[in-house]
Image: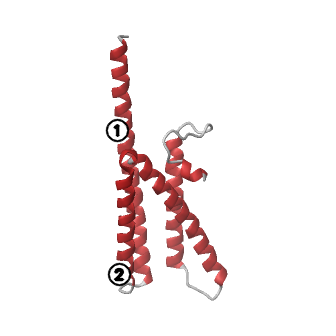
Amino acid sequence: MHLALLGTPGFHFPFVEDSRCLISCVFGTPAVTNLALMIFMLLWTPTADLYVYFIVFGIWGIGNGIWSSQINSLVGTIFSDRSEEAFASQRMLQGLGTTIGYFYAKHMCMMEKIYILGAICVLGMILYIAMEIIFRRRTCTMRKFINRQVFENTGL
């Protein structure tokens, strides 16, 4: 519940000066967790011990839950004026990614699939950081413009 609120406009933690830093940490944590699990899966030799599978699946599920809630919050925040189109595009691209994953699943071995997944995770985080930088610059420029207009209109 609290994680889904991090991406909403106007939500701030009283004990954190810059909640954007906290939001970036919330996106970075599942990325690092997923990459660590991918490295573990590349180095691990499967055994008959089922508890290892459940631990990996459980940690992966927690990361996936954070990703899902935060991406929905991010899409809703960035595209607040066109949310229907944004969420439709998001779902369409998720379906396209799933389709592509199912297509190449029988043509590649597991190690190749893990490498592809890791590369997509790293690329996604790079693009997220770029989006954060662009969004902050636009927000800062907008605030300066609004402040300038208010200053000029008040005659101070």
Against 91, residue 21 (above or below) is above
Q: Give me the residue at 51% from left, 44% from top.
A: 21
For the residue labelled by badge 1, is the local secondary structure a helix, a strand or a loop? helix
Tally of numbered tags: 2
Looking at the image, residue 154 sits to the left or right of residue 29; the answer is left
Q: Amino acid at mark 1?
A: Arg
* Mark linked to residue 65: none
Against 121, residue 126 (above or below) is above
Q: Mark 2 = which residue?
A: 103
Picture coordinates of residue 151 (x, y %)? 37, 17
Q: Mark 1 = which residue?
A: 138
For the residue labelled by badge 2, is the local secondary structure a helix, a strand or a loop? helix
Picture coordinates of residue 61 (x, y %)? 57, 68
Query: Who comes first in sequence, dot 1 or dot 2?
Result: 2
Against 133, residue 17 (above or below) is above
The C terminus: image quadrant:
top left
